[in-house]
Image (cartoon, grey):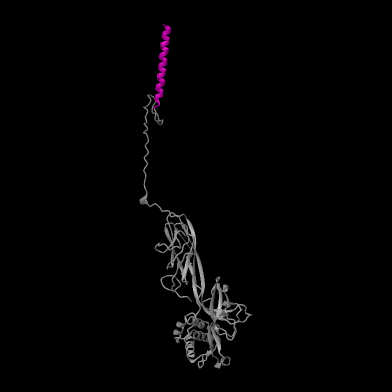
């Protein structure tokens, strides 16, 4: 992806079980491509005889049809490729840097490339070097034709659509009649049975929704990934106990055990996040990146429009990428207590009994309406009377002693 998520193509650009189709624009990264003619990669063809408006082109002189070598620096990597000419009779200047532009920006105001670009693109994808020589020759009705013949037929067919010229059917090449027959047969296949092929669009990718929230101990999702790309990557820094899964909770493969980056090779459109029970509340932002290889007919023209040179076209895959980001949050899973699980505790408090003594009515005193305090009011009274009696007795005894 780095972790990787493989996404199948689907008809409505929503990932699922079926394939989807790609359908147009120059990749955003095209301005980073550096291109220069490179004679060391040229592949020879042969001279072809052309007509324009029914007359011999260039007074019947053969026009050299060959594959032109290019040195391409793209994404920091250097490569060589070959291209066909889409501009007669402009000369190719070997030291003139080229740049990639959309089909509609062909600099020659007299070109027919703009209106016939899809026809040219179809030729590029049904001949050499997109196909090997043997396959191209067989599919174009000239089995056994040599590479130089395939190149000559292909270039002549491209000029037919870009510059309005025709291959001279009576004298196709400067070679022998067998070569003429092969070149003419392939030329007719490429021009008469050509439905055109539009540019593929840049891939698209979307995650929906952009944010989901759930609880630890559950699957949070789905996040639905919609894309027109063929492969994708989920990128995230995941804490322990958090993983990406499918709808059944099956963990998606990771790049390496112990790596906190989620990396998946899966064929699904719906992604879930599984948060284990007990994981502290948190959140994770993750990114899905998708890539595609677009089969463009790529147009290269002079980088400096004041330096005139041939415009060239190749059938070279173009890498393109897109991404989208989403976020998942989770809280602690607090399980409520149900009534059936509630334990009732009964607390019994024992209170010592209080004895209440109701006093008897005082003789001659009538009823006493004072509230009971739990002790008899007569107890201290009786004690006092006893003390008084004892004091009186002692007094009597003392007096008797004096009398004696």
- The residue segment tinted magenta is 376-404
From this viewpoint, which residue is outermost toward the top? 404
Q: Is residue 69 above or below residue 373?
A: below
- The percent coordinates of residue 88 (x first, y second) are 57, 86
On the image, the x and y values in percent for residue 395 come to 42, 13
- Number of callouts in the render? 0
Residue 321 position, x and y percent, is: 51, 70
Res. 219 image quadrant: bottom left
11 lies above or below 115: above
User: Which quadrant holds the C terminus?
Assistant: top left
250 vs 197, left or right, is: left
Magenta residue check for 403: yes
Residue at figure coordinates x 51%, y 68% from the top left: 323
Q: Position of residue 308 (x, y in %)?
A: 62, 82
Q: Nearer the viewer, residue 338 or 328?
A: 328
Residue extending furthest toward the right: 306
From the viewer's perspective, is residue 366 above or below residue 72?
Answer: above
Give left or right: position of 358 versus 260. Answer: left
Magenta span: chief secondary structure: helix
**Residue, far left:** 340
Q: Is residue 390 magenta?
A: yes
């Amino acid at each position: 992806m780095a972790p990787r998520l493989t996404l199948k193509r689907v008809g409505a650009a929503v990932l699922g079980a079926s394939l989807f189709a790609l359908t147009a624009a120059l990749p955003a990264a095209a301005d980073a491509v550096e291109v220069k003619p490179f004679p060391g990669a040229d592949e020879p063809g042969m001279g072809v005889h052309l007509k324009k408006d029914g007359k011999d082109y260039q007074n019947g002189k053969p026009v050299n049809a060959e594959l032109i070598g290019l040195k391409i620096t793209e994404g920091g990597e250097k490569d060589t490729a070959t291209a066909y000419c889409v501009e007669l009779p402009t000369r190719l200047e070997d030291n003139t840097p080229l740049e990639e532009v959309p089909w509609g920006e062909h600099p020659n105001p007299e070109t027919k490339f703009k209106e016939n670009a899809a026809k040219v693109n179809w030729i590029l994808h049904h001949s050499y070097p997109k196909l090997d020589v043997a396959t191209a020759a067989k599919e174009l009705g000239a089995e056994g034709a040599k590479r130089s013949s395939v190149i000559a037929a292909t270039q002549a067919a491209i000029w037919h659509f870009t510059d309005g010229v025709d291959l001279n059917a009576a004298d196709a090449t400067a070679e022998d009649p067998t070569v003429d027959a092969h070149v003419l047969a392939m030329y007719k296949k490429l021009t008469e049975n050509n439905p055109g092929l539009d540019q593929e669009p840049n891939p698209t990718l979307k995650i929906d929704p952009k944010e989901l929230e759930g609880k630890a101990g559950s699957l949070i999702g789905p996040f639905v990934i919609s894309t027109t790309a063929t492969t994708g990557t989920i990128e995230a820094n995941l804490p322990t106990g958090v993983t990406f899964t499918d709808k059944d909770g099956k963990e998606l493969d990771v790049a390496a055990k112990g790596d906190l980056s989620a990396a998946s090779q899966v064929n699904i459109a719906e992604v879930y996040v599984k948060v284990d029970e007990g994981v502290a509340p948190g959140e994770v932002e993750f990114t899905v990146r998708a890539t595609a290889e677009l089969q463009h007919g790529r147009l290269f023209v002079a980088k400096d429009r004041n330096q005139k040179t041939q415009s060239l076209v190749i059938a070279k895959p173009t890498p393109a990428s897109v991404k989208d980001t989403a976020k998942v949050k989770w809280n602690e899973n607090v399980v409520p207590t149900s009534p059936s699980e509630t334990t009732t505790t009964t607390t019994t408090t024992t209170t010592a009994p209080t004895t209440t003594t109701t006093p008897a009515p005082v003789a001659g005193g009538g009823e006493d309406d004072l509230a009971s305090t739990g002790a008899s009011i007569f107890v201290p009274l009786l004690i006092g009377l006893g003390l008084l009696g004892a004091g009186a007795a002692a007094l009597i005894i003392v007096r008797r002693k004096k009398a004696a």
